[in-house]
Amino acid sequence: MDCLRISGGVPLRGRVAVSGSKNAALPIMAASILASGPVSLARVPDLADVNTLALLLGYLGVEVKRGANSQMRIETVDATPIKADYELVRRMRASFCVLGPLLARRGRAVVSLPGGCKIGTRPVDLHLAGLAALGASIRIEHGYVIAEAKRLRGAQIDLCGPCGPTVTGTANVMCAATLARGKTVITSAAVEPEVVDLGRFLISLGANISGLGTSVIEIVGVEQLAASDYTIIADRIEAGTLLIAAAITGGEISVEGVVVEHMTAVLNALEESGCHILRGHQQITLLATARPRPVHICAQPYPGIPTDLQAQFMALVSLANGQSTIRDQVFPERFMQVAELNRLGARIERSGSTAIVRGVRRLSGATVTACDLRASAALVLAGLAAQRETIVRRLYHLDRGYERLDLKLARLGANVTRQVEADALDMAELGSVPALPVV
Ligand code: UD1
C-alpha cells in the first residue's frame, strides 16, 4: 500500500490539465452495455475505480481495451452474462450502475446490493422503485437484486429522496428507459453535469432524450442503440480540489480544460474566502492573496457546492481567520475527515449535522490515515499547508478517484513523494501478513 509524504509550506504555482470526470466515465462505461456496436470513449481517467468497473464489464461479456491518450474502446462480445458479483460491487458502489443497462438490454440482471458505506447510509430504494415502475419484477435474494422484464415500458417516475434527487439512480433509470416501449418521464431528476454527460452519450448512441440538465427528463424508448465515439467531460471535482490546493498554500495556479460554468458555486465560495479568480475559456486561474477568510459552506445537489468538495473546503477554512461552518445536505454524516484534520492541528467540532471550524494560524504535520476518497484529498491539502512533514497513509482511497494527484501537485511545485507504506514493510519483516485493503 502506498502513502504520500508531504513537506508542507510550498505555494503551488503553474498550470495543470484536468482529467476526464470519474463520475461521468463510470456510468457511461456501464451504459455501453446498451450499445449494439463498439463504443470509443476519449478522456477516460486512469483510476482504480475505472479499472474496477472494466473488470466487472469483462465478467459481463463486455471487452474493455485502453488505448493511448486516455482512450477506451468498449464492445460487447457475449451478451449472456447478467451477474455483478458482490466482491466487485462492494468495492465500488458505482458498479450498481450496470443494473439498468443489463436489465434493459439483456432482460435480466442479478446485481449485488452495494452494502455499507463510510459516508453514511446510501440506500438504492429509488433505483429499484424506478425500475419497478418501468415494469421490472424486482426481488432481493441473498444480498442480490434480481430484476427481470421481457421489455420495459415507459412510466412516470419521481426520483427525489429525503436528501434530494439521486445521481446514479437517475443514471440507472434513464439508461433502462432508453430501450423501453413508449415514453418515460423522470421528475426530480438529478441535474448534475455528469448526468447530462451520460444523457448526451446515450443520445450519441441513438437514444431519444430531452430535458437533460433540468429536473424533468423525458425519454422515448427506441428499438436499439448503436455505436458511438464520445468524449467525457472534465472532472469538476478534480479541478476544485486543485484550486483549493492552490488556495490553501497561498499559491497561484491555472486549471485547464475545465467547463467553467460547472464550477460557479465553487468559485464563488473561493472568492468569498478571499481568493482572486479569473474565468477564461476552459480555464480558471486562482490567485490566493492572504490567509483565507471564514466561509459558511453547505454542500447541496448541483448547482450547489458538491458534497465531493466539502471535505477539501473544510481543510481550507481550518486555516481561516475566524470561524466557519460546514454542512452537507446530501450526505449529512459525511465528516470522517474531522478527526484526522484535528490531528494536524485543526479545531473542528461537530454540532449535529454542522461542523464548526475555528480557524487556526497554522497546521502541524503528522501521520494521518485516509478513510475515504474525498477525505483523503482533504488530508493531502491540509498536509500541503502544514508545517514540516505530513504522511497520508492508505493512498489507495485517493487513487480510486484522482488520476495521479501526487504527480500533478509535484508539477505545481509541491514537495510530495509516494512511498510504500512503512508499517506494511515492518509487518512483513515481522513475518505477519498485512491486512488486505477494505474499500
Ligand atoms: C453520486 C456520486 C458521488 C456523489 C453523490 C452526490 C457517482 C459515481 N457518485 O453518488 O460521488 O457524492 O452522487 O452528488 O456519480 N438516496 C436515497 N435513495 C436512493 C439513492 C440515494 O435516498 O435510492 C439518497 C442518498 O442517501 C443521498 C442522496 O440521495 O442522501 C444522494 O445520493 P445519490 O445522488 O444517489 O449519490 P450516488 O449516486 O450514490
Image (tube, rainbow, N blue to C red):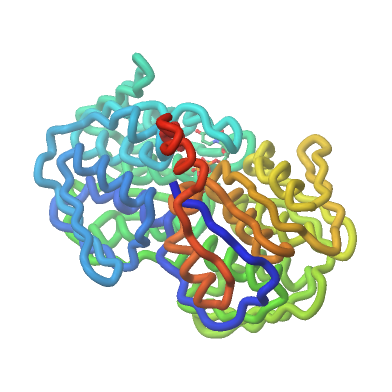
On the rendered structure, is 148 left or right of 322? left
Position in image of residue 313 (x %, y %)? 70, 58
On the rendered structure, is 44 left or right of 392? left
On the rendered structure, is 124 left or right of 324? left
- Quick one: 396 or 175, which is closer to the camera? 396
Residue placed farthest to the left in the image?
A: 77
- Quick one: 200 or 250, which is closer to the camera? 250
Position in image of residue 366 (x %, y %)? 69, 52
Q: Which residue is drawn at 23% across and 28% down?
A: 108
The answer to whether 401 is drawn above or below residue 77 in the figure is below
Residue 216 at least partly seen: no
Residue placed farthest to the right in the image?
A: 322
Q: How many labels does the image show?
A: 0
Query: For residue 336, which quarter of the picture?
Result: top right
The answer to whether 139 is drawn above or below residue 350 in the figure is above
Q: Residue at x 78, y 57 (%)?
A: 318
Residue placed farthest to the top in the image?
A: 142
- Quick one: 174 or 182, which is closer to the camera? 174
Q: Residue at x 76, y 47 (%)?
A: 342
Position in image of residue 185 (x %, y %)? 43, 44
Residue placed farthest to the front in the image?
A: 430
The answer to whether 293 is drawn above or below residue 226 in the figure is below
